[in-house]
Amino acid sequence: MSKHLSQFLLSIALLLGLLLVFYLSRSLNKSETSVDKQAFQTVSYCNTFKGCQTRVGDGSITLSILPASMPTGQPLDIKAEVSGLAAEKVSMEFVGRDMPMGLMPFNLEKQSGHASGTDLYTGTGSITFCTTDSKMVWVARLKIETREAVHTILFELDNVGGVLN
């Protein structure tokens, strides 16, 4: 009987050891791949001919898209000036406001030699032609990642005097 009991206890100990290794490896993988950051979202209107600007916490964002008429299928020069946020990564994508037609996000590269206290990020993107909605309203989704938080700024784009699709 004691032999059976010791085998049973050994089996339980091995099972508990395996479970402990499994849970420890999962928690280590989780902590390495995902950092808990606060998420904030700001929604702002943007006339592309006048430029886009909004406040984000103690900082501000200025977004410029050229050409302001936003022709479909053509390269658009994107400039984002970030002030008051210690951005580690900045990316952007264009999505349909009423129809999720998001394109792949593209990273904006930090430029050196810009004014003190303001960082300039630039890149090239484009929007696609919407075959089902000739009045598609596009949104520029700007994502700014800092050490503490992820800020998503949604600029609803209006290019009065131009054509968005």
Image (tube, rainbow, N blue to C red):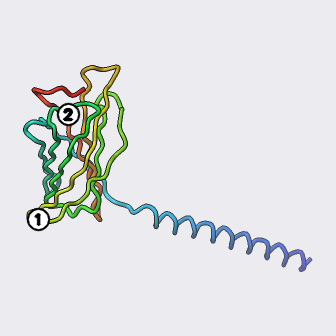
> Mark 1 — residue?
117
Q: Position of residue 13 (x, y in %)?
A: 73, 75
Q: Position of residue 44 (x, y in %)?
A: 17, 40
Q: Earlier in the sequence, mark 2 or mark 1?
A: 2
Q: Residues within 10 Å of mark 2 (few under 14, many from 20)?
A: many
Looking at this view, is 108 or 10 the one in front?
108
| Picture disc at residue 17 | none
Q: Is residue 23 above or below residue 62?
A: below
Q: Is residue 67 above or below residue 4?
A: above
Determine the residue positioned at 36% across, 32% down.
101
Determine the residue positioned at 20% across, 44% down.
77
Q: Amino acid at mark 2?
A: Met
| Left or right placement of residue 25 versus residue 133 in this view | right
Total numbered labels? 2
Looking at this view, is 15 or 101 the one in front?
101
Q: Amino acid at mark 1?
A: Gly
Q: Residue furthest front?
A: 74
Query: In which quarter of the view is residue 163 placed?
Result: top left
Q: Is residue 134 above or below residue 19?
A: above
Quadrant containing the C terminus in the rendered view: top left
Q: Nearer the viewer, mark 2 or mark 1?
A: 2
Determine the residue positioned at 46% across, 62% down.
33
* Secondary structure beneath label 2: loop
Q: Position of residue 136 (x, y in %)?
A: 26, 25
* Secondary structure beneath label 1: loop
Quadrant containing the N terminus in the rendered view: bottom right
Query: In which quarter of the view is residue 19 placed?
Result: bottom right
Determine the residue positioned at 14% across, 37% down.
46
| Picture disc at residue 70 | 2
Query: In which quarter of the view is residue 131 placed?
Result: top left
